[in-house]
Amino acid sequence: MAKITGGRFIAETLKGYGVTHIFYVEAIARTALVEMEEQGISRVLAHSEKAAAYMADGYARIGRKPGICMAQSVGAANLAAGLQDAWLGRSSVLAITGRKPPVALYRNAYQEIDHFRMFDPVTKYNVCVDNVDQLVYLLPQAFREATTGSPGPVHLELMGYEGDTICAAEAEMEVVVEEAFARCPSVRSEPEPESVKRAVEVLLAARKPLMVVGRGAKISVAGKEVRELAERLSVPVANSVDGKGVLVDAHPLHVGVVGTYSQQCANQVFEEADTVLFIGSSTGDQITNNWTLPRPGARVIQIDIDPAAPGRNFPGAIGVIGDARSVLRKMLSLLDHRVNGRAAGWLEHVNSLVDSWRRETEPLKNSDKVPILPERLCAEIDAAFPTDGILVSDTGYNAIWSSTMVDLNSPGQDYLRAAGSLGWAFPASLGVKCAEPERPVVCLTGDGGFWYHLSEMETARRWNINTVTVVNNNSMFAQALRGIDRSYGDRCGKREELYCFNHTDFAALAVHLGCCGIRVTDPSQIGPALKEALNATEPVVIDVVTEGHHPAPWTKTGTRAIKLN
């Protein structure tokens, strides 16, 4: 083998694993960046490390393949903070940082701290590359770790403040690409037959069954199997916010989003179900409405790739361990006929709840009020959304409104939302567009979220990443309003200081940064603005002035409301 530099090895390896873009902040791995240009890999320079991590996260989630982000030593702490959402969202992001050599340790070296341990809570695999020879083993292993089991972020710390010690060094290295680990899921683990049989028996015995799908079902690409099992067993299907789109919203068995970010009808079905099948769900506090759902005494079945997951929050749950799609196919193989009529009364009741919720929300979706109601904004996005579109949402109220008010009725549509980090959606949508350049990408964020990474509009324009960003602009952190009002009670004071911003025209800012900006103040303007934006050949920001004191339907169940602390 001929000697090559570490930078060339990194570039050729990334190319071999199908990486088309990397996202970074100067200065890191410059030798590798030069080699990447020769490999045809786009090097997207961002304005902050967190934004670079979010871009790689969006790229990884929609592309179902590893996304790459990089930063020098002094920016590593910011990059680690940006990986929190990838960790929570089970996203296969590979982070690369530098560190100063050992001679600089314990001597007050400029800008240097021990950032390595900051990556421990947000990665599956966190290793130092001290010698160029280690790249042959550690870089391919990073791809294996990121894509196997439950996907997640990984981190390589390269010797050298800019990773230059590793990238500039030469060694005899051969690039070996393991194609299976270039995608998620890379390995589809099979369940034990007895656990599958037991799960099917429990479902068949249920009088009021419900299937609840999470992000794991989406990672597994198990939509077809979810639909077939639901139809075969006549079982209604709910989803977490992250599981939206696994089953199209228009399907007669679909009941909506459950949990604290939810639809009331879906939570009521969840509350009344006597048997719940969780598919690829962590069963955390959000999807279970702070673990108040399902009701006490309900049977719980959990399909999960992690053997430690079933029973974590519901002791006694029936665990079926394996890849979601593989498990569902095994379950379907045990059902040689449809179970028609068994749950007819249950389904009629479920459908009546869904129909009632849709009737109740229809006036909000059609409202002509000014400032604009968020439900009307979402209804207009719904009407304009292309059949192959990707909707990327921030967390908070925008996640509630978008997941409940925008229907995905085409199998070609996708929905992604922040796993918890406000401000994620806009930079993530840029990464999404890089992974899927031919598909329309619409980002829905609030002004509070958009302010986080406003500077990346310049990145979008520089790289001509033609996303459509809809800013739900109410000049405040609207989700905070309830808690602040509770804290103040009857006291007088300047409570608006805790949640309000100056009124800002984001459309004008977009124009100043070289993008297209459209300002919307009346509901009748939303549809034409979306049509114009979706046909544009440049990044577009649609600034929609909305009512901030209009709350989202937060934490409702069928019979009670659960208050958050």
Image (cartoon, grey):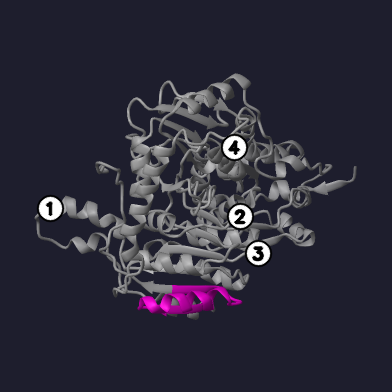
Q: Disc 4 or 2, which lies upstream in sequence?
A: 2
Which residue is located at x 39 percent, y 68 percent? 377
Residue 551 among magenta residues:
no
Q: Amino acid at mark 2?
A: Tyr
Query: Magenta region: which residues?
Result: 516-542
Which residue is located at x 38 percent, y 50 percent? 354
Relative to 151, is 316 on the left or the right? left
Q: In the rendered structure, find residue 489 and report the number of the disc placed on it.
A: 1
Asked whether the beta carbons under mark 3 and mark 4 sit within 8 Å of each other, the answer is: no
Per the image, label 4 sits on a secondary structure element best described as strand
**Mark 4 and mark 1: span between their CA atoms?**
47 Å
Per the image, label 3 sits on a secondary structure element best described as loop
Q: Disc 2 or 1, which lies upstream in sequence?
A: 2
Percent x, y for residue 446? 39, 64
| Nearer-the-camera pick, 465 or 318 | 318
Q: In the rendered structure, find residue 437 and report the number of the disc placed on it.
A: 3
**Mark 3 and mark 4: span between their CA atoms?**
31 Å
